[in-house]
Image (tube, rainbow, N blue to C red):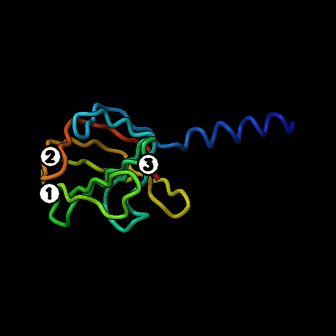
């Protein structure tokens, strides 16, 4: 009986992990996000995507529904403002995990700042 319970618990936790797909690029290099988090944890409506190199994208919707984004290079505490160069579709799930509504959605970027260029499309689900 104990073995069956442990297997069941593992399956439940595995199904709670966020998932990101797409073809996003930062400065011409692929950005393969391995984690995603709901922006609710940082006080914004959107999502934060991160890769194994420590690069992060915070993608949000302003109060008027327009796009806002920031790129955080590895180990950077402050991000580079991307402006309104993309589109973001974020849908909160009805489920609540540890007080956070996971989010699903998509992003399209065509950003060029003084320091960085970001482009591509991405899809995310169950980011909490």
Judge left or right: residue 120 versus residue 17.
left
Comparing labels 3 and 1, the label whose residue is closer to the camera: 1
Residue 98 — which label? none
Rendering quarter of residue 38: bottom left
Q: Where residue 21 sits in the image (x, y, percent)?
A: 36, 33
Residue under circle 2? 111
Q: Are marks 2 and 3 in contact (CB under 8 Å)?
A: no
Residue under circle 3? 127
Residue appearing at x 28%, y 53% in the figure: 71
Judge left or right: residue 55 versus residue 10.
left
Q: Are marks 2 and 1 in contact (CB under 8 Å)?
A: yes
How crowded pointer 3 is (Cα within 10 Å; few <14, some 14-19, many 20+) is rated as many
Give above or below for 36 relative to 80. Answer: above
Q: Which of the marked residues, 2 or 1, is nearer the chain's N terminus?
A: 1
Judge left or right: residue 9 versus residue 109.
right
Give above or below for 21 relative to 110. Answer: above
Rendering quarter of residue 82: bottom left
Residue under circle 1? 83
Between 56 and 10, the one lying in front of the other is 56
Residue appearing at x 29%, y 50% in the figure: 90
Q: Which of the marked residues, 3 or 1, is nearer the chain's N terminus?
A: 1
Separation of marks 2 and 3 at Cα, in angstroms: 23 Å
Quadrant where the N terminus sits is top right
Residue appearing at x 37%, y 41% in the figure: 124
């Amino acid at each position: 009986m104990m073995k069956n319970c442990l297997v069941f618990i593992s399956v439940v936790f595995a199904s709670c992990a966020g998932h990101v797909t797409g073809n996003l690029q930062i400065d011409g290099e692929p950005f393969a996000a391995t984690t995603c988090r709901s922006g609710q944890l940082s006080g914004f409506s959107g999502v934060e995507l991160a890769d194994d190199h420590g690069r992060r994208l915070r993608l949000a919707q302003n109060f008027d529904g327009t796009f806002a984004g920031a790129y955080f290079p590895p180990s950077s505490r402050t991000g580079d403002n991307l402006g309104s160069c993309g589109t973001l579709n974020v849908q909160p799930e009805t489920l609540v995990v540890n007080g956070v509504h996971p989010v699903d959605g998509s992003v399209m970027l065509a950003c060029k700042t003084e320091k960085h260029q970001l482009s591509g499309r991405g899809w995310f689900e169950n980011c909490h």
